[in-house]
Amino acid sequence: MNTATQTLKFNYHAILAIYKFEMARFKRTLWQSLVTPVITTSLYFVVFGAAIGSRMGEVDGIHYGSFIVPGLIMLSLFTESVSNASFGIHMPRFTGTIFEILSAPVSAFEIVLAYVGAAATKSILLGLIILATANLFVPIHIEHPFWMAGFLLLVAVTFSLFGFIVGVWAKGFEQLQFVPMLILTPLTFLGGVFYSIDMLPDGWRTFSLFNPIVYVISGFRWSFYGSADVGVGISLAATSVFFLLCLGLVWLIFRTGYRLKS
Amino acid sequence: MTAIISISQLNKTYASGLVALQDVDLDIRRGEIFALLGPNGAGKTTLISVVCGISTPTSGRVTVDGHDILSDYRAARAKIGLVPQELYTDMFETPWATMNFSRGLFGLPPNPAHLEQVLRDLSLWGKRHDKIMTLSGGMKRRVLIAKALAHEPGVLFLDEPTAGVDVELRRDMWSLVRRLRDGGVTVILTTHYIAEAEEMADRIGVISKGKLILVEAKSVLMKKLGKKQLTLHLQEPLVEIPSGLSDWGLTLNNDGSDLEFTFDSSKEHTTIPVLLRRLGELGIAFKDLNTRQSSLEEIFVSLVTERR
């Protein structure tokens, strides 16, 4: 009989077990997890960067092909973070194997750290691969690399937390797809991936400022080119607020056992 | 024997209003095999779920080896291994990988020697690198047991462990449970198969409609509640029970050829000789006799029926 867990204060073995399990699933589905988004992003460059971009000139003094790179990375980062984290926690609920997680000596914090950590790792990896892919098509200059890395990490963690919430909330795979497909993707497209919101008419520009994605993309683009639709401080604050909101909701989920415990 | 699990005044009411457990008090003794019997929906799985941390109690207290399941949940859960009723496992994993996962989840470093021993004990060693989805139903159930034993628990919950498995595997499983008990593991099993409880349990608890009706040592239960039946095969059939035997509660069967007497097994030694003497006095001869004791199943059914 074991005695090691009697004095367990922080279950890093459990974090590692869940993390490795999730990364193993990532390897098993490497094609859909990694290659598909890379191909999709490459197609964006071909269509928007080369075909349409060649007629667009420059945006804020940046070549259009280069301008869309941060937005495209964010587009993938949002969808992959949400998909990976939501699937990661939803799958054990769907198959019933969640019983093992709930009956193990693991705290809510450790569970979230493992699932969100794995989802964020995957999406950051993907973001970096897309960055490298983009570099093959257009010239890229990163003016604030530390800020870029910081934004990448913050956004990946925040949207992975959001995905975790979606995964707990969803009653089935249809609902699991609902948030990324019908809410996140439209907001991202309208959030300035392919354009600067300064290019919009006044009314639409004001309307766009209610879209939280605008702030995230703007901040990330600033780290590349030093110019943005909104101030970088506001971007950082908006992203941080969303992060804290997600963190609060996750805390509430474990506090109440919402859709995890009966 | 000291209690390894103490449950006091445990209540569980689901959000739907369903009362699943009512004022359950129960002590599980260290090193015993405890069988929890009850019809569907009686609260067996809910009780296990609460102790294991899957379900939150509405009120009451549960300790595992002295550790409260809420305030000291890490230490309490670390002691417990759970084999669920359904075959909940990751079908794309291998037994080896999933056992390592389970061990890590319970906060322990890898121990290949222990995992090998468990897999060998469960006759799964040769299948350790096969995908679980390719294994038979019986093997999948054994994988679940292997996962539950991966972290060397002191208490093992088996929720309907032999549901849907063949006779041979059931026997193997019973043998495994006994070996675990001999190794110091306390085993709590829920079952529909009375034969399973009769075969293995040291003590039996009967739960019905969320209430623990009784907890008793199996032998005491059988003795206390078990009825014995004496059947006398008469030389000459009787048309009716003679008036001289009317106080005995006898019944005639098989066209009057069999005289049956149901009695309390604890009074066996005093009542049967008196009855046989009385039959001799009345000139009723018999050519053969046999006795039969009621099974645990009959006891269980009568207990649950009484409560309805």
Image (cartoon, coloured by chain):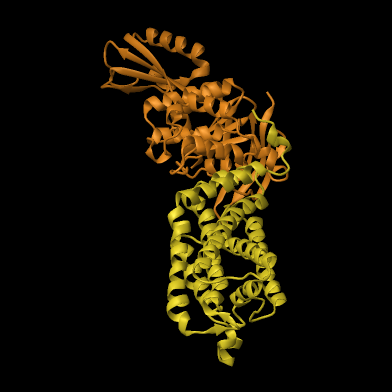
Chain colours: A yellow, B orange
Q: From the viewer's perspective, is residue B289 above or below residue A255?
A: above
Left or right: A115 in relation to B66: left
How far across and down, in percent of the image, does residue A92 sit? 51, 50
Q: Nearer the viewer, residue B62 or A41?
A: A41
Residue B51 shows in the view: yes
Left or right: B250 in relation to B2: left
Q: Quadrant of the N terminus of chain A?
A: top right
Q: Quadrant of residue B204?
A: top right
Residue B37 shows in the view: no
Q: Quadrant of residue B194?
A: top left
Q: Nearer the viewer, residue B25 or A93?
A: A93
How far across and down, in percent of the image, does residue A103 sit? 60, 43
How far across and down, in percent of the image, does residue B26 sit? 64, 35
Q: From the viewer's perspective, is residue B17 above or below residue B179?
A: below
Residue at image x 66%, y 81%? A230
Query: Please, which residue is most extreme toward the bottom here?
Result: A202
Residue at image x 53%, y 59%? A86
Q: From the viewer's perspective, is residue A207 above or below residue B175?
A: below
Q: Nearer the viewer, residue A134 or A221?
A: A134
Left or right: A253 in relation to A180: right
Q: Nearer the viewer, residue B122 or A133?
A: A133
Q: From the viewer's perspective, is residue A7 above or below residue A188?
A: above
How far across and down, in percent of the image, does residue A154 sit? 65, 64
Residue at image x 60%, y 77%? A214
Instruction: Give the total number of marks visible in the rendering.
Output: 0
